[in-house]
Amino acid sequence: MQQKERLNIYLPKRLKRRLKDLSEDTGQSMNDLTVDAIKDRVDRGDSAHSAPDIVLDRLGQVLNTLILVAQDTTNNEVKQLVEELVEEQQTLMSDIRKDHAEIKQLLTDIRNRQ
């Protein structure tokens, strides 16, 4: 379990009311919603946890599922189709990784120029 620290924040009344309404609508605590919102914002600003990383994680999950489906199926046509999808996904993931590395380098260059 992650260790937690307390942080006191002041919200405008309207925002707090909206947060409370969302909490009641979703059944999540106001704290959990706030932590999720802050995490999303910090992740967007932190290139180490950027959207391409999230996409790569999700693609990895899908790839593992496709591999399991290919291993479990006895129908050769389905198995061949799944194998083709796995190969295509691996190619796409490789391309995304390359693009992600290039974007990170560009961001580093831009930060160094400032």
Image: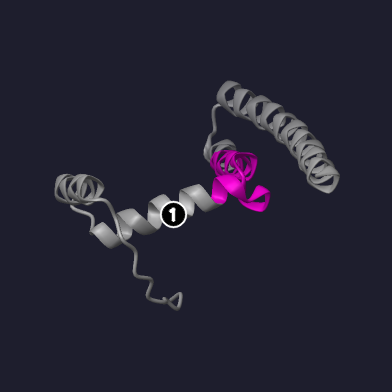
Please name whichever residue, 83 or 72, is drawn nearer the observer in this view of the structure: 83
Q: Residues within 10 Å of mark 1 (few under 14, many from 20)?
A: few
Q: Is residue 9 magenta?
A: no
Q: Is residue 74 above or below residue 31?
A: above
Instruction: Give the quarter of the image for residue 53.
Output: top right
- Quadrant where the image shows the N terminus: bottom left
Q: Is residue 56 magenta?
A: yes
Please name whichever residue, 48 or 98, is drawn nearer the observer in this view of the structure: 48
Instruction: Give the quarter of the image for residue 85.
Output: top right
Image side of residue 7 versus residue 56, left or right: left
Image side of residue 114 versus residue 58, left or right: right
Q: Is residue 111 above or below residue 11?
A: above
Image side of residue 23 versus residue 45, left or right: left
Residue at x-position 68% and y-position 25%: 84
Q: What element does badge 1 sit on?
A: helix
Please name whichever residue, 46 or 58, is drawn nearer the observer in this view of the structure: 46
**Residue 8 on image: x %, y %:** 34, 70
**Residue 25 on image: x %, y %:** 15, 44
Residue at x-position 61% and y-position 23%: 81
- Quadrant where the image shows the C terminus: top right
Magenta highlight: main SS: helix
**Residue 15 on image: x %, y %:** 25, 46
Q: Which residue is mark 1?
A: 38
Look at the image and give the residue range highlighted in magenta: 43-65
* Three-letter code, disc 1: Ile
Residue at x-position 70% and y-position 26%: 88
Question: Could you tell me how many numbered marks the image carries?
Answer: 1
**Residue 98 on image: x %, y %:** 80, 36
Please name whichever residue, 32 or 81, is drawn nearer the observer in this view of the structure: 32
- Judging from the image, the colouring scheme is one colour
Image side of residue 30 versus residue 103, left or right: left
Residue at x-position 34% and y-position 56%: 34
